[in-house]
Image: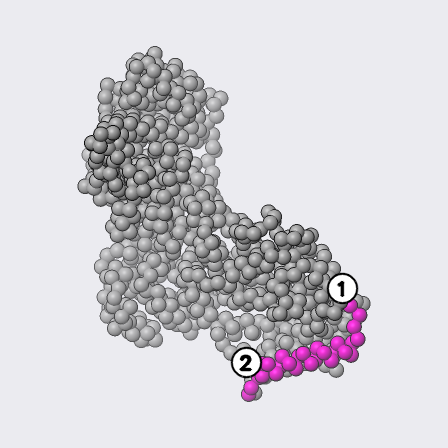
């Protein structure tokens, strides 16, 4: 891959250069014979090669071949080794001569390993059972040994000369049953240790037929000094107490690969409950950046030592700069950081993970595609290096003939274009890896701040007094209070150093007033002080310090956000994890997209279901995390001035609609007495939800109805609504979603939580003795169908239209609405000389009541007033219909918009919504003119 020199964007290479078709002029039916490994195999196993069925080697074909080799008199160990040689010869032909997909090769080698381990373990069990009896658990069932495949085996990505990284875990301690005469009993631990030796002999020992796989147990707990096998409970203790950060990357790709019976019957799933919480933390986890830096530095240093005096070893397509390992690290780092909150990122395969990362917005789609192409290219090169002599090497050969052969089998006419393509891929990979570990921007530093987050994370911690000396006076006074603060003094040295570096960077931001940035010195200081208050409460949660240190641009956007208003700081205290939403600058230019948001929620739920984590509590937390993050995204755009008040309300209302739809669907799926696949219900929104005027923290005024003749329906839907309200309102560790108000349902708080649609319609339209009051009809002017059975939407719209257009006595209606306005005014008295933007005479409520009267009194004659299009549009329509004097409706609409804007800004800054009357005299007079025009 290359980048356009003008734009820096990725330029996709011709895919034929990476994967030529089978009819390529470079596809040569004798190319495989250049491999010295193939030459040896064809001499040694000429008689056996036809035994393997034609085509790509899959497990069933390999199983049949193994059985045939054993039938010819070969023992299991010899048969497995011969099978391996037959498979390798076939793969060289398929890959080099027929240009098979990379997955054909990696799947075949992986399935060969799974088959070999399964067969070897079964034989070990037969032999040990005969001498010692089966290993038993406390409840008398057979104890199981699980063979855990790590790395490329776990990810089903084995290369043709891979060793296999294994960890052996058994489910329970105990002892064997012994022989029929009661002899031979040993502990389960000893039984499994002996089984492992047998497996190694059958798979890993080198004999006249070579080996099946090189076996490496170094990744097991305690490394090479640890026991060959440990119990599941011992593994859990180890991971909780001693598990290191780099081991999380190793366990990310882990899976049980043998015995097959445990995989098929599901007993191996017990391992998930131990491994998943270790790999994926509940909160965003940026502490792993430094762990990965250390690991990568060690790998590069090791590669450099190996290359010392051997310059040809610098061309290592796996470990050198821009190699396979850097692609894997890039993917795994993003998975480990985010996988706790975004389960859809949890996958072992590198090529499967890349598009998931792109869909999650963690890397551009073009970057993910370019990294995937680089990965496939480098893996195909790696295989050809290993095909030459069956050596576990990743270094390009130094011989011209071998290098030319590699180029030819990849579809190149000569070495030069191949090496050029290789260099371009590696340079692109290296750039992306350096960007990831180097942060998303350079911090604005002066003398005391080290350049870049990578260096800032290490080194000696800054001295507290030295840091204080460099701070601006007002900021210094606030930080001075940390000198004896117990939370600060109790920090580990590493965390204290991180905190002080963040203080330094914050001070640099205070000084660095760039023109055109749109934030003055006073708001900068407020941002720094609010950041101090925020970080002080979270200082023990080190991942947030690590996040800000790793992401200077996120730190700066956070400071700007906190400087703009007070309410964001309060929201961040309740939901600190949402700061990661600031990582992408493009977020500010986006809008809420309901379809993609809902799709992501469903993908996360499915991912949780795959690992058996989709219990009710986890789904409640999933909904809350997603809602909080999206609310924060809207909040960030709002305070940055990217959205109008109306756009904020539209996005928050659309978000609420989506949350109601998803929550309803998931609740019904988990309802014990659900009597049909899909519920026949609807949610009617009133008030701010109905008018699409939601603000931050608004409650939801909703009414539930159903249309279902099944005799079980009343009970089922009542349980459904209770469950849904609980899901929406209950507080979990992630907080809550909404406050729910159902008082507008028929008969208010004394009525049923959900009624049939016909009962609701009759109540609203005044049929029978049980009918709605005028104030309920006022509420109906702002009602809308939110979610539910689509067939009910036109029926609701018809009911609403019938209600608002019903014939009414204008004088009586006017009297009732004025009386209701006085009740509201009495409930919200305005004291003093200040003007309350909402409740004072001439405020927002007056405008809203005037609109409600106009709709109820005149919509029968003026159909344009029927639509629920909001107060501003309705005022303009009323004037256009001649119901208001010229200019009154438009002036009142403008006044309402401005009052709403002032209220919104005041709430964002947690300021009073009472202002000096002279500041809004124009708006007040416009609303009063409207009131007098409507009510006299």
Question: Where is 623 relative to 884, above or below?
Answer: above
Q: Is residue 738 above or below residue 386?
A: below
Q: Residue at x 25, y 73 (%)?
A: 484
* Magenta span contains residue 824: yes
Given residues 318 and 632, the one toward you in this image is 632
Judging by the rendered image, the residue that carries numbered circle 2 is 914
Residue bearing mark 1: 802
Disc on the earlier residue, 2 or 1: 1
In the image, the segment drawn in magenta is 806-832
Image-quadrant location for residue 440? bottom left
Q: Residue at x 65, y 61 (%)?
A: 755
- Circle 1 packing at 10 Å, graded few (<14), some (14-19), many (20+), is some
Q: Position of residue 740 (x, y in %)?
A: 55, 65
Left or right of residue 650, residue 288 in this image: left
**Can I make out residue 42 in this image?**
no
Q: Position of residue 26 (x, y in %)?
A: 44, 22
**Residue 605: where, in percent of width, then height?**
48, 49
Provide the major secondary structure of the magenta segment. helix
In the image shown, does 176 or 462 lie closer to the viewer? 176
Task: Label 1, secondary structure: give it.
Answer: helix
832, 370: nearer the viewer:
832
Q: In the rendered image, which quarter is residue 732 located in? A: bottom left
Q: CA distance from mark 2 to mark 1?
A: 39 Å
């Amino acid at each position: 891959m290359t980048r356009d020199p003008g734009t820096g964007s990725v330029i996709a290479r011709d895919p034929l250069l990476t994967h030529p078709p089978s009819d390529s002029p470079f596809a040569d039916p004798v190319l495989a014979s250049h491999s010295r490994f193939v030459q040896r195999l064809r001499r040694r196993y000429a008689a056996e090669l036809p035994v393997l069925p034609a085509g790509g080697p899959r497990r069933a074909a390999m199983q049949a071949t193994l059985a045939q080799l054993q039938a010819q008199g070969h023992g299991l160990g010899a048969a497995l080794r011969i099978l391996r040689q037959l498979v390798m010869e076939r793969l060289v032909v398929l890959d080099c001569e027929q240009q098979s997909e990379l997955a054909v090769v990696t799947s075949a080698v992986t399935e060969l390993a799974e088959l070999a381990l399964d067969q070897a373990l079964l034989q070990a069990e037969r032999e040990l059972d005969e001498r010692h009896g089966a290993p038993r658990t406390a409840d008398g069932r057979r104890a199981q040994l699980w063979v855990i495949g790590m790395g490329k085996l776990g990810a089903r990505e084995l290369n043709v000369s891979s060793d296999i990284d294994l960890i052996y875990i058994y489910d329970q301690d105990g002892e064997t049953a012994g022989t029929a005469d009661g002899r031979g009993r040993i502990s389960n631990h000893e039984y499994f240790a002996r089984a492992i030796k047998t497996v190694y002999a059958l798979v890993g020992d080198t004999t006249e037929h070579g080996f099946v796989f090189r076996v490496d147990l170094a990744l097991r707990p305690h490394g090479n000094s640890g026991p060959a096998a440990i119990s599941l409970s011992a593994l859990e203790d180890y991971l909780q107490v001693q598990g290191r950060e780099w081991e999380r990357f190793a366990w990310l790709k882990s899976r049980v690969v043998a015995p097959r019976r445990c995989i098929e019957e599901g007993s191996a799933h017990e391992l998930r409950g131990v491994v998943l919480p270790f790999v994926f933390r509940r909160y965003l986890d940026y502490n792993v950046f430094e762990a990965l830096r250390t690991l990568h530095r060690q790998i590069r240093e090791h590669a450099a030592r190996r290359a010392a005096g051997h310059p040809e070893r610098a061309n290592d397509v796996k470990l050198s700069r821009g190699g396979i390992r850097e692609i894997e690290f890039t993917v795994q780092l993003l998975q480990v950081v985010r996988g706790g909150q975004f389960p859809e990122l949890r996958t072992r395969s590198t090529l499967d993970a890349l598009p998931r990362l792109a869909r999650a917005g963690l890397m551009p789609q073009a970057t993910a595609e370019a990294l995937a192409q680089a990965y496939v290219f480098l893996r195909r090169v790696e295989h050809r290096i290993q095909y030459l002599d069956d050596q576990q090497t990743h270094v390009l050969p130094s011989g011209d003939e071998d290098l030319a052969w590699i180029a030819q089998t990849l579809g190149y006419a000569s070495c030069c274009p191949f090496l050029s393509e290789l260099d371009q891929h590696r340079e692109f990979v290296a750039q992306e890896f350096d960007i990831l570990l180097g942060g998303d921007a350079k911090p604005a530093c002066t003398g005391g701040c080290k350049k870049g987050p990578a260096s800032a994370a290490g080194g000696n911690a800054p001295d507290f007094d030295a840091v204080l000396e460099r701070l601006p006076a007002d900021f210094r006074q606030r930080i001075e209070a940390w000198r004896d603060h117990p939370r600060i003094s109790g920090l580990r040295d590493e965390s204290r150093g991180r905190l002080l570096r963040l203080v330094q960077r914050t001070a640099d931001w205070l000084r660095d007033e760039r023109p055109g940035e749109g934030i003055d010195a006073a708001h900068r200081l407020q941002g720094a002080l609010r950041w101090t208050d925020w970080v002080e409460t979270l200082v023990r949660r080190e991942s947030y310090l690590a996040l800000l240190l790793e992401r200077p641009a996120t730190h700066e956007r956070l400071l700007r956000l906190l400087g703009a208003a007070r309410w964001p700081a309060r929201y961040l205290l309740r939901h600190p994890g949402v700061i990661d939403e600031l990582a992408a600058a493009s977020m500010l230019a986006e809008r809420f997209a309901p379809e993609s948001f809902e799709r992501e929620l469903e993908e996360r739920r499915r991912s949780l279901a795959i690992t058996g984590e989709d219990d009710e509590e986890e789904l409640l937390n999933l909904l809350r995390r997603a809602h909080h993050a999206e609310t924060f995204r809207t909040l960030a755009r709002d305070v940055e001035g990217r959205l109008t008040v109306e756009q904020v309300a539209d996005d928050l209302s659309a978000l609420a609609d989506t949350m109601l739809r998803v929550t309803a669907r998931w609740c019904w799926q988990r309802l014990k007495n659900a009597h049909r696949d899909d519920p026949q219900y609807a949610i009617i929104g009133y008030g701010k939800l109905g008018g699409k005027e939601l603000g931050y923290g608004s409650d939801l005024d909703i009414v539930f109805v159903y249309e279902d003749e099944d005799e079980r329906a009343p009970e089922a839907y009542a349980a459904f609504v209770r469950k849904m309200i609980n899901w929406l309102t209950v507080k979990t560790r992630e907080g809550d979603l909404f406050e729910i108000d159902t008082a507008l349902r028929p008969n208010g708080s004394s009525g049923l939580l959900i009624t049939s649609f016909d009962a609701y319609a009759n109540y609203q339209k005044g049929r029978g003795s049980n009918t709605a009051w005028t104030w309920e009809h006022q509420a109906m002017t702002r009602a809308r169908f939110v979610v539910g059975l689509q067939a009910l939407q036109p029926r609701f719209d018809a009911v609403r239209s019938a209600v608002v257009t019903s014939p009414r006595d204008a004088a009586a209606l006017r009297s009732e609405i004025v009386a209701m306005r006085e009740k509201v005014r009495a409930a919200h008295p305005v004291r003093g000389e200040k003007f309350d933007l909402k409740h004072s005479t001439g405020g927002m409520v007056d405008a809203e009541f005037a609109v409600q009267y106009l709709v109820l009194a005149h919509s029968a004659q003026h159909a344009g007033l029927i639509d629920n299009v909001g107060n501003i549009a309705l005022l303009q329509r009323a004037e256009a219909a001649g119901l208001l004097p010229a200019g009154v409706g438009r002036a009142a609409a403008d006044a309402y918009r401005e009052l709403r804007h002032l209220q919104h800004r005041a709430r964002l800054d947690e300021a009073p919504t009472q202002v000096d009357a002279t500041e809004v005299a124009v708006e007040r007079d416009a609303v009063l003119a409207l009131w007098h025009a409507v009510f006299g």
